[in-house]
Amino acid sequence: MHELGIVTHVMKTVKEVGREQNLTRVSAVTLEVGEVSGVVFDYLESCWKWSVNRADAGILRDSVLRCQILPGVSVCEDCRKTYATVQHGKTCPYCGGESTFLVSGNELNIKEIEGV
């Protein structure tokens, strides 16, 4: 389960930003998560809830995690069209080409930190 490692890293980064911005409390964190990133959302949410209820959660204590899903998009090198990766995999639905590559949907970004 790499979700716990992700949560640990996100929390560390948010705490650093919080210190830089003189925040005393973070109420919510919004992540952008690619649909083909391999992240299991239920596990991510469970790890977050467990982590923000620990004594060492600091300014993140009881904060909420929000996730926005970024769609997986691939491009075909043969016809140069983009398409939904999850729906069609590695085969271009327009020309049947297999020279395709992922252009988005594998990200994991901290989009927003809400705090005071």
Image (cartoon, grey):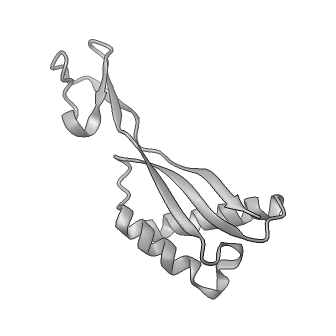
Quadrant in the picture for the N terminus: bottom left
Question: Which residue is found at the position 26% from the left and 23% from the top?
Answer: 99
Q: Is residue 78 left or right of residue 72?
A: left
Compared to residue 65, the image places residue 112 above or below, namely above
Q: Is residue 1 visible?
A: no
Q: Is residue 7 above or below residue 99?
A: below
> Is 54 left, or right, of 2 in this rendering?
right
**Where, quadrant-wise, is the C terminus in this rendering?**
bottom right
Left or right of residue 44: residue 8: right
Residue at image coords 36%, 67%: 42
Q: What residue is at 63 percent from the left and 52 percent from the top?
A: 112
Q: Residue furthest top?
A: 79
Residue 68: give x, y in percent of width and height.
46, 50
Q: Is residue 59 above or below residue 103?
A: below
Quarter of image, res 98: top left
Taking the spot 50% from the left edge, 68% from the top edge, the residue there is 5
